[in-house]
Image: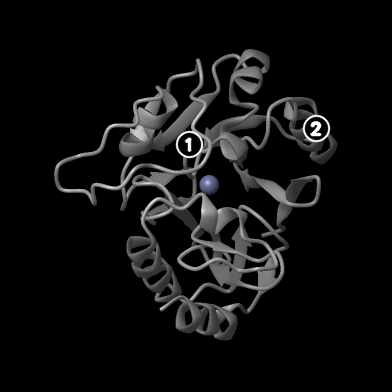
Amino acid sequence: MPIHRISSFGFVNAYLVPEEDGFTLIDAMLPRTHKKILAAAEALGAPISRIALTHAHGDHIGALDALVDALPGVEVRISARDARLLEKDKSLDPDEPQVKLRGSIPGARTRPTATFAAGDRVGSLEVHAAPGHTPGQVAFLDPRDGTLYCADAYSTLGGVATTAKANWRFPLPAMATWHKPTALESARALRALDPARLAPGHGPVVEAPGAAMDRAIARGA
Ligand SMILES: [Zn+2]
């Protein structure tokens, strides 16, 4: 399965995942990137059929409203937990760590057409819980080729790192992380999926990432 990464300023990623009915777009980048995303799909010759959001931080949902305007009828999916962040609801559940959410939570006008939870599928992609960066962050595993779209559970800019501990080369994802112990648990859970390829929210795609993920977890602990 070819990896179609769209990158903004070299450090914010979205991905077009081929499906029988077109593309699943993973994440919606920064505001005003919708034209770039639409042009990428057009150049590849297929429509965007659905938008699957890993979490509701501003650099992952920035172009969502503009994309939905441009793609009538497009399916929009996000976890039920982070759907609340899309509505700018920053409240915590009683069973969650009582720590303030971090990172940019600008909300969006768009409401999901449906939410998902761990164990569901979006197109061909398996939904895996990856809380910590936000309470409802998810990662997507493509079982067709072992690509793990890991959101901000790991970043690869300046080397593979978890967001449980700031990587001095690129500290932003860790700075925006809500609860670092939970983020580390999620990094471990995603490592156990033994992905063939790591496709993060920030940074380049990394092939055969297992050993680098192990080192990142060891540093984060
Ligand atoms: Zn984020």
Would you say residue 150 is visible in this rendering? no
At 38% from the left and 36% from the top, the residue drawn is 82
Task: Give the x, y percent position of residue 140.
Answer: 48, 54
In the rendered image, the vertical position of residue 182 relative to residue 58, given as above or below = below
Give whichever of 124, 156 is nearer the camera. 156
- Element assignment for label 1: loop
Percent of width and height locating residue 186: 37, 64
Residue 2 horizontal side relative to residue 58, left or right: right
Q: Image height check: is 18 above or below 69?
A: below
Give the left or right position of residue 38, taking residue 65 as reference: right
Residue at the spot 59% in from the left edge and 19% down from the top edge: 65
Instruction: Single out the residue that lies furthest toward the left.
Output: 94
Residue matched to label 2: 36
User: Quarter holding the N terminus?
Assistant: bottom right
Which kind of residue does numbered mark 1 sit on?
A: Ala
The residue indicated by pointer 1 is 56
